[in-house]
Image (spheres, rainbow, N blue to C red):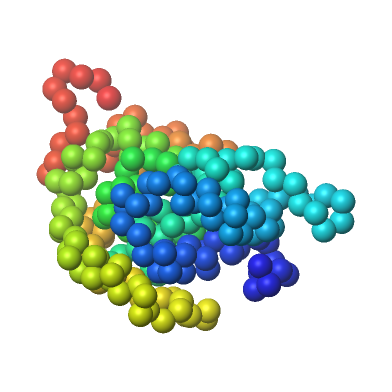
Amino acid sequence: MRRFEESSPAASDAWLAPRLHYTLRLTRAEATESALWNFLALCVAPDFVQWRWGRPKDGERREVGQASRFCGPWFSQCFSRLWWAAEIFRDGKDYGPAETACRNQDVLNTYLRQELVTYRPAAQAVARMLERDVVRTGRQLNALTQGAYAASATKIYEALAPDDLQDFGALQDWIDSRDGAVAAPDDRLPVGPDDGGVSEQSVETLVKWFEELLSVVRVRGQKGEEPATKPPATGGVSLDKPGVSP
């Protein structure tokens, strides 16, 4: 809160997400326990929830309009949304893509809820497009998400851009070492679990595919030519079915 007192509270998301993930060191199963996040928000750091989500009222007092920021779904609760964003967007031990993703509130508010984001190459492709400014606005991100679902399904992306299995033993070793771990650094990203990154080829394959999708989907409020009526070619994997109109 002191670090971001002169900027928007939302700017703290990109800084806090990887450090929260590094510090807590949870399995995904443990992270589904809402009691943990409720305890953090209601007992450990309610002042932070008020600062991040509250509206100024009566001087220094802040009123939080959404109870879900204290105890709500994983994608809305103040702390769980950040942990899951770091978990989904990290590339093995590299939290850089997670930091990039969390700088965009539309990633946290919209894209994080989509099933597609759980596929690691897709998450890395989106983070890379954000980093390269291929996707600049929330409307572009929302249009890309809708286009990706309209064009295909997760199984198609697995065929286009396969993902390697994570090393769950390395993840467990990282979790077990938390008692002896150093505190998360303030001015550089911590190092996450070395459980395997995403294939560079798979990421670039999906970046190219998503760029083509973005060129044909309708972006609300964007002027230009009418969008195409069917998705672009996928380099050998056809999404069209004979006798079925797109």
Number of labels in the image equals: 0
Q: Residue at x 16, y 18 (%)?
A: 243
Query: Taking 190 as reference, is 39 above or below it?
Result: above
Q: Foreground: 171 or 197?
A: 171
Percent from the top left, x then y, of residue 148?
33, 40
Residue at x 19%, y 29% (from the top left corner) = 240
**Front-most of residues 117 and 48:** 48
Q: Is residue 160 left or right of residue 91?
A: left
Name the spot of residue 155 as percent of width and height, x first.
18, 39
Quadrant location of the C terminus in the rendered image = top left
Q: Residue at x 32, y 32 (%)?
A: 150
User: Which quadrant of the view contains residue 83?
Assistant: bottom left
Out of 111 and 51, give the one closest to the viewer: 51
Question: Looking at the rendering, which quadrant does residue 167 occupy?
Answer: bottom left
Residue 8 figure quarter: bottom right
Q: Tell whether 111 sits left or right of 10.
A: left
Looking at this view, name the residue that lies furthest to the right: 58
Q: Is residue 140 visible?
A: no
The image position of residue 241, as x and y in percent, is 16, 25
Determine if residue 86 is in view: yes
* Rendered residue at 59%/46% (across/down): 70
Q: Describe residue 120's horizontal placement relative to residue 57 as left or right.
A: left
